[in-house]
Image: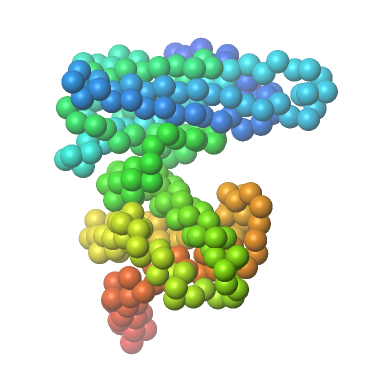
Amino acid sequence: MTIEDFAAAIATANNKDWTQFKRWYFQAGTPQELVNEKYDANEKKYTLTLKQSCELSSQEKIEKVTKLDFHIPLVFGLLDSVTKKELALTEKNNTDFEVNSEGQLLLNLTKAEQTFVFTDIKNPPVLSINRQFSAPIHLKKSGSVADDLFLMGYDTDSFNRWESAQNAFVHFFKKQMQFLATQNSSQKVTQGGSKDSAFELMKSSEFNLYLNSLAAILESNQLDPFIKAHLMHTPSFAYLLQQVGELHPVNFLQAKNDLESQIATHLENQLLKIYQDLSKVIQNDYS
């Protein structure tokens, strides 16, 4: 069986024309998705604009290839920022989305830029998009870290909760790197973190919200321990290196240590309780 046979079988079963979708098989690179949002409180209207782009690879530049638009399927949801519940969207709100075989809401981006308008949205919504990593793309959202903190606590999609937690950590990591950089001219920075630099983090109300969101995750009775563990896992060195420009090794390590030490200190009681509970389970299993 060839890729063409496989794609044709899926297209036939779903009564879809996936000619454009097959561009994923012969166009190089990872598309970038720019997300812009606007909410009109008077009209209770939410406007979502998606714009895709994909840089040419070295070979494509040599061959002077013209890149065609991808078909990007995006599973999404909107959460009410006031009630913190997911909105049950219907055709009354928008007719451009569809519901897939798993009951998920789906937007199909097939052009360089598309705008989707949702009406009768009573409160400002928080967008959860590319759920379950429905498309292998790079997302660039216009929202603030407040949206990531909100999704950390209330999104019903585990992947997006995890990604929001990663995004929030990166946000504070970059801020701490900037703070440490300003200290270099006035004092020597030592590896391993310092109370002064870590204390600077605690002045941020956003960082305290981040810590409280992590605490809520640990205290939740609804989340599976496996999901909790992944949500608590901080980004790797390799991933953080991709997020910063010019690297200052000492500041890099200190910023990461500062964040992780504050997380550990703030969540000491919750983490200790989990350790004690799991220790009892292990003892009972082997007693």
Q: Residue at x 58, y 49 (%)?
A: 243
Q: Residue furthest front?
A: 186
Quadrant of residue 124 in the image?
top left
- The one nearer the camera, 142 or 198, is 198
Please indicate whether residue 85 sits to the left or right of residue 256 in the image.
Answer: left
- The one nearer the camera, 116 or 12, is 116
Q: How many numbered marks does the figure carry?
A: 0
Please indicate whether residue 98 sits to the left or right of residue 258 in the image.
Answer: left
Q: Residue furthest bottom?
A: 287
- Residue 214 seen in the current view: no
Figure colour scheme: rainbow
Q: Position of residue 31 (x, y in %)?
A: 58, 29
Q: Is residue 89 above or below residue 266?
A: above
- Residue 132 seen in the current view: yes
Please indicate whether residue 120 sits to the left or right of residue 189 in the image.
Answer: left
Please indicate whether residue 3 sits to the left or right of residue 231 in the image.
Answer: right
Q: Position of residue 107 (x, y in %)?
A: 40, 23
Q: Quadrant for the C terminus, please.
A: bottom left
Q: Position of residue 138 (x, y in %)?
A: 54, 36
Q: Is residue 74 above or below residue 287?
A: above
Q: Position of residue 218 (x, y in %)?
A: 30, 64
Q: Residue at x 54, y 34 (%)?
A: 137
Q: Is residue 193 above or below residue 85?
A: below
Q: Quadrant for the N terminus, please.
A: top right
Q: Residue at x 51, y 69 (%)?
A: 257
Q: Residue at x 60, y 65 (%)?
A: 185
Quadrant of residue 272 in the image?
bottom left
